[in-house]
Image (cartoon, helix red, strand yellow):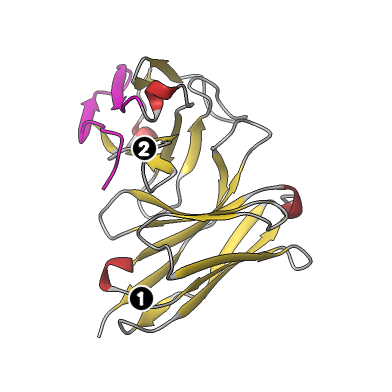
Amino acid sequence: QVQLVESGGGVVQPGRSLRLSCAASGISFSNYGMHWLRQAPGKGLEWVAGIWSDGSNKYYADSVKGRFTISRDNSKNTLYLQMNSLRAEDTAVYFCAREAVHLRFGVFDIWGQGTMVTVSS
Amino acid sequence: QSVLTQPPSVSGAPGQRVTMSCTGSSSNIGAGYDVHWYQQLPGTAPKLLIYGNNNRPSGVPDRFSGSKSGTSASLAISGLQAEDEADYYCQSYDISLSGLYVFGTGTKVTVL
């Protein structure tokens, strides 16, 4: 079964850290670039970070650069997002998604169900 | 802060045809990058609806169609159905801004 399952969300105080995980199954994980995206409550979608299939290249939105780190373990079919120095504006549902290079550059064809991160004192 | 602009809402009666626009600039859509569309039902993850401007993934009804011209793109839904009531987002790539993958502001489709 093709699916991505995020975990690790929760309530955290400003300035603290949190690590999200995204477990993949049925999607040939090691062959695809993977991404994290987020959606603040009642707002639109925002791309957060991406990583190449072999993990050799990583890129970030300016809003999280220097605070968030994306990584992957292809042996475990798992994607990670380490979030440090969290701010109230990071409050959002975080989705992981596969970049479908077999379809077209820059399109996300499989999404997880999302995990909620709330940054509040 | 979304880079691509969409109308906040569109509505139509069942069976009608509705369209929504996605306006970008010379650094994204106008630079030749593809536009993709996603449907997000309430409380769920986005679902890929159209990729590469006008291609439907397997399983997406042909009632949905996309087009692109210049710095804009559009999504059309023909034969509107109650289950089409959702938020729709366009997405592209931008070469000038901090967010490499950019999304539209989103359009809420209401079936009257």
Q: Judge whether residue B18 is colored magenta.
A: yes
The picture places residue A30, in percent across and down from the top left corner, at: 75, 54
User: Would you say A76 lies left or right of B78 here?
Assistant: right
Q: Residue farthest to the top?
A: B69
- Residue at the (49%, 42%) spot, across then down: B47
Instruction: Look at the picture and state if B72 lies above or below A74.
Output: above
From the viewer's side, name the closer residue of A110 and B26. B26
Q: Secondary structure at mark 2?
A: strand
Q: For the magenta stretch, what is the residue range? A: B1-26
Within 10 Å of disc 1 (Cα), the crowding (few <14, some 14-19, many 20+) is many
From the viewer's side, name the closer residue of A19 and A52. A52
Instruction: Look at the picture and state if A28 lies above or below B112.
Output: below
Q: Judge whether residue A107 is colored magenta.
A: no
Query: Which residue is label 1 attached to?
Result: A86
- Disc 1 is attached to a residue of which chain? A
From the viewer's side, name the closer residue of A120 and A2. A120
Q: Amino acid at mark 2?
A: Tyr
The picture places residue A65, in percent across and down from the top left corner, at: 42, 62
Q: Residue farthest to the right?
A: A75
Query: Which residue is label 2 attached to?
Result: B89
Instruction: Tell me the chief SS of the magenta region.
Output: loop
Q: Secondary structure at mark 1?
A: loop
For the residues labelled 1 and 2, the Cα–Cα distance comes to 27 Å
Instruction: Look at the picture and state if B16 lies above or below A9.
Output: above
Q: Which mark is residue B40?
A: none
The image quarter containing residue B112 is top left
Residue B72 shows in the view: yes
- Residue at the (40%, 44%) spot, across then down: B40
Circle 1 or circle 2, nearest the eye = 1
Residue B112 shows in the view: no
Within 10 Å of disc 2 (Cα), the crowding (few <14, some 14-19, many 20+) is many
